[in-house]
Image (cartoon, grey):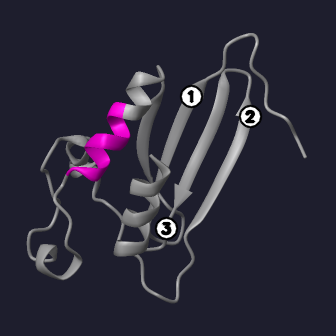
Amino acid sequence: MFTNLLANAARFSPEDKPVSVSIDESDLGLVIRVIDRGEGIPEQFREKVFDRFYRVDNSRNKETGGSGLGLAIVKSIVDAHNGTIEIKQTEGGGATFEIHLPLTQDQQVINN
């Protein structure tokens, strides 16, 4: 999941812009965010990008590569853990992938 999200963020972000990851605990479980400063994903395509082989902008495909499977794999992993994933606009430009994963009662996050 992380490999695909981070590879995507790196692929579509300018070299001089950071990609960041945050992991927080909420009352319902973990909230994981992968945040990039690339072009972002237009709202009308945000659900479709999780479909196998779907790619938003075919004009960029030759430059950026990829098969359109990475985000479908991410969604499958999230679904297998009874989680949810959504894409939000990053403030200042880019895309934020926000994943919510539930924790069972016997799981807890260890804060360092």
Q: Secondary structure at mark 2?
A: strand
Q: Earlier in the sequence, mark 1 or mark 3?
A: 3
Front one among 51 and 27: 51
Tag 3 residue: 36
Q: Read off the magenta span.
A: 69-76
Dot 3: element: loop
Q: What is the three-letter code of the residue carrying label 3?
A: Asp
User: Which quadrant of the figure has residue 52?
Assistant: top left
Majority secondary structure of the magenta segment?
A: helix
Residue at figure coordinates x 14%, y 67% from the top left: 57
Residue 55, placed above or below residue 13 = above
Inter-mark Cα distance, 1 to 3:
21 Å
Q: Is residue 30 above or below residue 2?
A: above
Expressed as whole percent of the image width and height from the top left, the position of residue 14 reads 42, 84
33 vs 94: above or below: above
Q: Secondary structure at mark 1?
A: strand
Estimate how packed mark 1 is, as few (under 14), some (14 to 19) or many (20 or more) residues with alpha carbons within 10 Å.
many
Answer whether labels 1 and 3 touch (C-beta < 8 Å).
Answer: no
Identity of the residue furthest to the bottom in this view: 16
Q: Position of residue 104 (x, y in %)?
A: 67, 13
